[in-house]
């Protein structure tokens, strides 16, 4: 009686047509029809056929080397079970027949192939070609379906567990992601601290104390770069259709888009940092009125003296002397600097707000601690009902315990937030307020990259030049006390602003203790002299 071994391979990308059960049925039927005795079976579950780097096929080749005298046939359901690379597969199978005198059988087509027969060799190539064509079509259909679902219908179809910050609800077409508020609080904390320049290792440590359990050195980075938290997902381009970020329908966002974008820009770093020259600090920062960034260069006059200038990177709209641009900027910084009475007003206003905020935080802290005690008591009660009284089943216990544990993490995070001594932190930052009285001196004493970042902070990276003046659609509210004078001198014009001068310096109202000013002072405190 003739003897055979067979090879079955299951791959997750074509499971419906080539299941292990189907391959088993096809090969078993062929063996019975031809009265062939099956010696052994080798199975590769869940492995791709891109190459022969698969565990069980390596064991198959090793088995053939040891036992080829007892083997007449190597049986597969289709030749593509060996490999999708026809050239590599034909070469390997030809070697098996030539070296060990073992014939290859495609049970699905009921063919025993022979490399010594030209017609048989030709048919082997045809079978591989048809299988490859089928795989290409299937891959195209799958990729097209995924693109349509994500980019057109706005569905989230990622497998596996829900991303951190969400949980799955519903089944089938009704399945969706909903926010887990205790985890969302951790995510917001991570984004907030990163923008405040807190080191990542400290953010991770604090986040873990709040309940963050994702492992890996890049866990915080993965959170910061995930577009899921702004209700978007990254979709690959397909069939000449664009890829990129696409919105996900009915997915509540955890982070606002502006915050997420600022984080991405910070992670990417300044685009023009490597090309900055100290003589041309505005290169790559300042824009032409056409919105393009300016570049810098040197020109030689009749006396063969070189002088720097700025020009539009893609047009002839701007050709600005660097000396003139720098002199104007120095005047702008001088007029933006805050007089001492404004510094005193900001400190006074901040002090009042901090007192009110501290009192409110104390109330919130007391209530949060009461809530935590109640939650701890509820957890003990649930454990008693399950372990001692046996009045609830395991499923109910697990559900209640998970809900209470999530609430405990959320309340603990609130306690940690309200326990911080923000008043002391603000007092430390307020020392940097004095530096705002001499913005011109501060700007001149720091490195070129820091100069650019300072201007980005004040003008939100919107500063451009047109008709002999700097212009911007946005400026920090802290520095709005001399805008009329800046306009009259053609130094700085704020787009869309209704210039209404104050009757006297006493009419000036200090800006509230807002996040913008806090962030700016945090940036100032980290500056180093050039």
Image (cartoon, grey):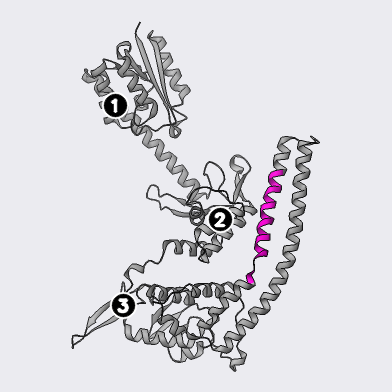
Residue topped by disc 3: 311
Q: Earlier along the polypeptide chain: callout 1 or callout 3?
A: 1
Tell me, yes or no, whether the two marked residues, 1 and 2, touch with CB atoms within 8 Å: no
Camera-near label (1 vs 2) is: 2
Which segment is the magenta one? Answer: 401-422
Rounded to the nearest angstrom, the CA distance separating label 1 from label 3 is 63 Å
**In the figure, residue 512 lies in which quadrant?**
bottom right
**Residue 411 on the magenta span:** yes
**Prevalent SS, magenta region:** helix
| Front in this rendered view, residue 519 or 177 | 519
* Residue lying at 21% horizontally and 20% vertically, measured from the top left: 118
**Residue 491 on the magenta span:** no
Camera-near label (1 vs 3) is: 3
In the rendered image, residue 36, in percent from the top left (x then y), is placed at 38, 9
Rounded to the nearest angstrom, the CA distance separating label 3 from label 2 is 47 Å
| Front in this rendered view, residue 8 or 380 | 380
* Rendered position, 231 above or below 105: below
* Residue 243 left/right relative to 227: left
Q: Secondary structure at mark 3?
A: strand
In the rendered image, residue 15, in percent from the top left (x then y), is placed at 46, 30
* Rendered position, 385 above or below 90: below
Tell me, yes or no, whether the two marked residues, 1 and 3, touch with CB atoms within 8 Å: no
Camera-near label (3 vs 2) is: 2
Other residues around mark 2 within 10 Å, as few (<14) / some (14–19) / many (≥20): few
Residue topped by disc 2: 205
Rounded to the nearest angstrom, the CA distance separating label 1 from label 2 is 60 Å
In the rendered image, residue 188, in percent from the top left (x then y), is placed at 58, 59
Q: Earlier along the polypeptide chain: callout 3 or callout 2?
A: 2
Residue topped by disc 1: 126
């Amino acid at each position: 009686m003739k003897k055979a071994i067979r090879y079955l391979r299951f791959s997750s990308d074509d499971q419906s047509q080539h299941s292990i059960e189907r391959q088993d049925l096809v090969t078993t039927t062929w063996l019975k029809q031809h009265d062939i005795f099956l010696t052994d079976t080798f199975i590769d579950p869940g492995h791709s056929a891109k190459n022969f780097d698969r565990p069980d096929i390596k064991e198959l080749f090793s088995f053939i080397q040891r036992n080829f005298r007892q083997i007449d046939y190597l049986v597969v359901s289709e030749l593509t079970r060996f490999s999708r690379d026809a050239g590599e597969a034909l070469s390997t199978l030809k070697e098996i027949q030539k070296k060990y005198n073992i014939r290859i059988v495609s049970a699905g087509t009921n063919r025993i192939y022979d490399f010594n027969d030209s017609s048989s060799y030709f048919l082997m190539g045809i079978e591989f070609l048809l299988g490859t064509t089928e795989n290409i079509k299937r891959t195209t259909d799958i990729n097209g379906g995924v693109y349509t679902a994500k980019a057109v219908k706005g569905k989230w179809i990622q497998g596996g567990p829900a991303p951190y910050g969400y949980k799955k609800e519903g089944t089938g077409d009704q399945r969706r992601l909903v926010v887990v508020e205790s985890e969302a609080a951790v995510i917001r904390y991570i984004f907030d601290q990163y923008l405040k320049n807190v080191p990542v290792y400290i953010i991770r440590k604090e986040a873990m104390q709040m309940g963050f359990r994702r492992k890996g050195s890049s866990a915080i980075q993965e959170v910061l770069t995930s577009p899921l938290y702004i209700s978007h997902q990254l979709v690959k381009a397909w069939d000449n259709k664009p890829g990129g970020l696409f919105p996900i329908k009915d997915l509540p966002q955890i982070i606002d888009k502006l915050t997420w974008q600022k984080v991405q820009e910070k992670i990417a770093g300044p685009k023009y940092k490597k090309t900055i020259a100290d003589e041309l600090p505005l290169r790559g920062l300042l824009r032409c009125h056409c919105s393009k960034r300016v570049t810098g260069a040197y020109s030689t006059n009749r006396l063969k003296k070189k002088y720097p200038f700025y020009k539009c990177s893609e047009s002839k709209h701007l050709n600005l002397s660097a000396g003139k641009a720098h002199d104007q900027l120095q005047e702008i910084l001088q007029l933006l600097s805050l007089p001492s009475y404004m510094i005193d007003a900001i400190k006074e206003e901040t002090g009042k707000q901090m007192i009110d905020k501290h009192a409110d935080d104390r109330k919130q802290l007391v209530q949060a601690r009461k809530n935590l005690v109640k939650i701890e008591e509820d957890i003990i009660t649930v454990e008693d009902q399950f372990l001692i009284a046996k009045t609830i089943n395991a499923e109910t216990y697990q559900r209640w315990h998970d809900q209470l544990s999530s609430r405990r993490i959320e309340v603990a995070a609130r306690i940690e937030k309200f326990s911080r001594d923000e008043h002391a932190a603000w007092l430390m930052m307020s020392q940097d307020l004095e530096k705002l009285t001499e913005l011109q001196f501060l700007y001149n004493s720091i490195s070129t990259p820091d100069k650019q970042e300072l201007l980005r902070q004040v003008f939100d990276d919107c500063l451009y030049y047109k008709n002999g003046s700097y212009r911007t659609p946005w400026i920090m509210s802290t520095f709005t006390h001399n805008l009329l004078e800046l306009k009259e001198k053609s130094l700085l014009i704020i787009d869309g602003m209704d210039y209404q001068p104050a009757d006297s310096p006493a009419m000036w109202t200090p800006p509230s203790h807002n996040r913008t000013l806090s962030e700016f002072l945090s940036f100032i405190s980290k500056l180093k002299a050039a």
